Amino acid sequence: MKLLNHTSKYLALLLLPLITIWAVLFYYAMLDEIYDSLDDGLENQKVLLTKRAAKDPTILTHNDFDKHVYAFTPISEDTYHTFVERYQDTLMYMHNEDDFEPVRIYESALKQDDEYYKLKIITSMIEEDDLVNDMVQYLIVLYVLLIVSILVLNNLLLKKIWKPFYHSIAQLKNFKIEKQDSITTLPSNIAEFELLNKTVNKLIKKTSDTYIEQKQFIENAAHELQTPLAIGINKLELFLENNELTDHQAQELTAVLDNLGRLTRLNKSLLLLSKIENKQFPDEKLIDFTTMTEAIVADFEDLSYHKSISISIETMESLTYYMNTDLANILLTNLIKNALVHGNNNASISIIVDTNLWTISNTGSKEMLDRVNLFSRFKKTTNKQSTGLGLAIAHAIATKYNLMLTYDFDGSHLFSIHFPNKG
């Protein structure tokens, strides 16, 4: 959910109880004003009737509400002195509505020519049910108008205000440091957005500079290590060939050559891992994993023949994915080589290619491998020539391309590459 819509959701949730509370308070405040206005009108009518009775005493004989909205009833002097004015709400039949309607009755006492009377005056009232219904309808309309106004405000005015922010987010989303891209930011008169733009530009420049320095360091270090290692191996091989040595001396030199060879391979593997993690393989294309698997298996034909291992490839569905060709080749090569090196002689290896899944299984040790550390660097194996980085490199490549490399054991060792769903 976008930030603007997220804000609108909470505004809508907040407005609902606020409007409800406001409506209740407004309702009672309005009723209080209505009653106060009605009571003032009734008291004013009393004053007018008192003045009229002084001029026309005949109105004092009106004792019902058939023809008038007032009625006089004679009372005793004691009742007059103890009488308390009061207001009463009741229902009265209205001929024009042909129904009982709410009215407000004002009762008071007055003295006229040494006679005492109780005066009742009635006036029509609003129907509270109708008032509540009308208020609810108006409040619903008000709430809808407020929500629509907020949405329009968000999608027109606020969207324009937030444009520099969304532009920066889009730039960052597509930014790839390995391609040495640069980003552009939109100028803004909002201090927070300007601060964000300056911080993003500063961070990207610093990160890019660090990336370039690290890349150069790795390449230089690998090159500087590779050269003396190659020279040392060549000189030792020449020395071993051109000099007569005892068996013990020859064995010692052979062990040194083996270690230097392993160090050379280790140097190359570490360089490859660093390049993968630093995303120095930007070129990608659509890889057909069935075709690549068949080519790699053909390359290992001599090793599989030597160990009397048969390799079967079963393609259930076509499997293609956008990757760097070299990294895809290394990923499959490491897994196939791992299965051959650690597989039992006179056994078989099964490779299955299916939609979004590539698996390889082989028979080896009869116990499950350590899942926790299996893809860790320098995982020790029984093969002394191994650098312990093969599966770590495969895992790094899989992670780079959002693939999931897993291991299972069901009597056979099963490595699986899970690809994202294309749908």
Image (spheres, rainbow, N blue to C red):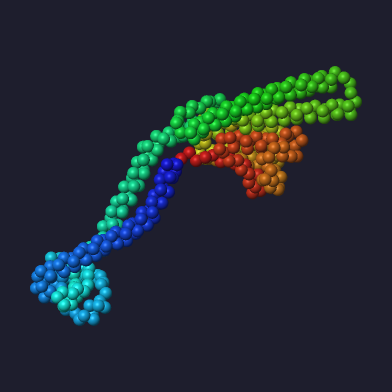
Image position of 116 (left or right of 360): left
Q: Position of residue 190 (x, y in %)?
A: 46, 33
User: Whole-percent x and y of residue 153?
Assistant: 36, 40
> At x 65% / y 44%, what residue is drawn?
413
- Of residue 32 and residue 59, the one placed in the foreground of this image is 59
User: Residue 38, image x and y in percent?
Assistant: 23, 63
Whole-percent x, y for residue 319 in the image: 52, 36
Residue lying at 25% horizontally and 78% vertically, measured from the top left: 81
Residue at 9 percent across and 70 percent down: it is: 56
The N terminus lies in which quarter of the figure? top left
- Residue depicted at 72% across the width and 34% down the height: 387
191 relative position to 160: left or right: right
Q: Quadrant of residue 213?
A: top right
Position above or below: 71 against 320? below
The answer to whether residue 367 of the structure is visible from this angle is yes
Describe residue 82's horizontal placement relative to residue 331 as left or right: left
Closer-to-camera residue (120/215): 120
Splitting the image into 4 quarters, where does residue 375 fall?
Answer: top right
